[in-house]
């Protein structure tokens, strides 16, 4: 499957990539979307735009540039792919990016795709999470939402996101999401050593106050600035220690074996919970059920592996749904076993380009 050289809709960025590594083994052409290690994919992360209005230090460079519109999946292509993945047994959909709320047709995408999946969620930086938007997204079929807040402190929030948005605006957005009936509402926080690690208890206090789950994600080597090093990572065990200095935690565990987050509740019976996601200190590839599609139409079977499988040439050359299905099946079959992070920085695309 090589990109078409004659398709005028494809720019050079689509054409100058090396082909992904293929195994010689034939891949299954029917049944569940399965990889070589017996894992079944039922969780799709669909990146609907690479654009973002923030420049989080652990994600984008200050001078980040974005794809030309012609290289991004159109709404029609996003919807077609959603239908295909649903037909292949994928039950859970997460819209992400970049910043998905910047997509001008977000509600259309939601209303077209939400009937196809049991669980429809979105990850957002919360900058556009007003009462009105939260209600509109809920009405369009969004079930739940995850909002990124790395610090409740306004100065640190602006420093990390390199934006002019106030943390209070995003915290109000969390309240708007709760008020609109999106459930559960979760918060993601990335802690960076020497920057916001001391904010962990304040974020845990936010979890208690709003009765939501706050998830602490270890910094992964997917930042555009290339600033990742193991010294910059705040390991989950250290985050738990900081929170435990203030609140006593009780381990609840993972909701399901393929879930990345390990959850803790508060011993004093307060609402809310905190979770840790530890891809660096405790890689959790064994039960992975996730598959990603990038804004420019590549299947990315593993977040932490470089291999990507192009769908855009097929989407833009009258390929049948069966052709697309086989391309997806082949990509999934070739998914890496995992554990790439233990080998250090992986370079390549940023989290914003892949779809976090
Ligand atoms: N813009 C939206 C947001 O920030 O929530 C959605 C896309 S963002 C790429 C998805 C998630 O990835 C966010 O929670 C963000 O904190 C996380 N993320 C981005 N870069 C990361 C990195 N290098 N390591 C760990 N998490 C990262
Ligand atoms: Fe934008 Fe999300 Fe990346 Fe921050 S983490 S720069 S909000 S895509």
Image (spheres, helix red, strand yellow):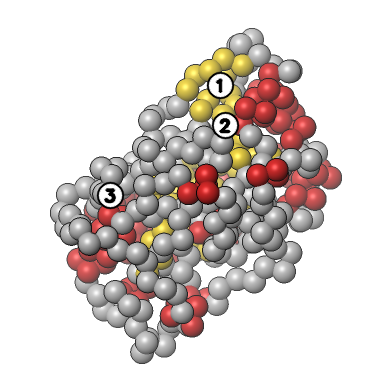
Where residue 107 sits in the image (x, y, percent)?
A: 48, 57
Residue plotted at (80% across, 50% down): 159
Residue 117 appears left or right of 339: left
Q: Residues within 10 Å of mark 1 (few under 14, many from 20)?
A: many
Q: What element carries label 2?
A: strand
Q: How far apart are marks 2 and 3 (CA)?
A: 26 Å
Label 1 belongs to which residue? Answer: 264
Label 3 belongs to which residue? Answer: 35
Residue 327 appears left or right of 5: left
Label 2 belongs to which residue? Answer: 276
Residue plotted at (36% across, 43% down): 289
Residue plotted at (34% across, 53% down): 335
Quarter assignment of residue 264? top right
Q: Is 75 rendered above or below residue 96?
A: below
Q: Which of 147 and 353 is in front in this view?
A: 353
Q: Residues within 10 Å of mark 3 (few under 14, many from 20)?
A: many
Q: Is 252 rendered above or below residue 335?
A: above
Q: Residues within 10 Å of mark 2 (few under 14, many from 20)?
A: many
Quarter holding the N terminus?
Answer: bottom left
Q: Is mark 1 within 8 Å of ligand 1?
A: no
Residue 232 appears left or right of 222: right
């Amino acid at each position: 499957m090589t990109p078409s050289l004659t398709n005028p809709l494809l720019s050079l960025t689509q054409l100058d990539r090396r082909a992904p590594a293929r195994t010689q083994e034939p891949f299954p052409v029917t049944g569940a979307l399965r990889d070589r290690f017996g894992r079944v994919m039922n969780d799709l992360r669909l990146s609907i735009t690479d654009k973002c209005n923030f420049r989080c230090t652990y994600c984008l460079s200050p001078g980040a540039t974005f794809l030309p519109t012609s290289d991004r999946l159109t709404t029609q292509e996003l919807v077609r792919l959603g239908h295909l993945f649903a037909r292949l047994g994928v039950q859970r959909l997460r819209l992400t990016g970049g910043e998905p709320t910047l997509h001008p047709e977000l509600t259309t995408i939601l209303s077209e795709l939400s009937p196809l999946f049991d669980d429809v969620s979105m990850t957002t930086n919360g900058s556009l999470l007003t009462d009105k938007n939260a209600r509109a997204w809920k009405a369009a079929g969004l079930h739940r939402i995850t909002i990124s807040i790395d610090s409740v402190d306004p100065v640190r929030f602006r420093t990390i996101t390199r934006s002019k948005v106030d943390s209070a605006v995003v915290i109000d957005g969390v309240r708007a999401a709760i008020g609109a009936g999106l459930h559960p509402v979760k918060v993601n926080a990335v802690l960076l050593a020497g920057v916001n690690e001391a904010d962990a208890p304040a974020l845990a206090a936010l979890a208690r106050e709003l009765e939501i789950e706050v998830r602490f994600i270890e910094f992964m080597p997917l930042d555009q600035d290339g600033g990742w090093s193991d010294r910059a990572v705040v390991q989950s065990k250290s985050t738990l220690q900081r929170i435990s200095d203030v609140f006593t935690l009780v381990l609840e565990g993972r909701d399901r074996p393929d879930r990345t987050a390990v959850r803790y509740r508060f011993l004093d019976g307060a609402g809310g919970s905190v979770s840790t996601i530890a891809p660096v200190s405790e890689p959790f590839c064994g039960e992975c059920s996730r598959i990603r599609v990038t804004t420019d139409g590549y299947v990315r079977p593993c977040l932490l592996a470089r291999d990507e499988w192009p769908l855009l040439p097929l989407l833009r050359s009258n390929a049948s749904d069966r052709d697309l299905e086989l391309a997806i099946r082949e990509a999934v079959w070739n998914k890496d076993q995992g554990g790439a992070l233990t080998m250090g920085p992986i370079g390549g695309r940023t989290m914003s380009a892949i779809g976090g």
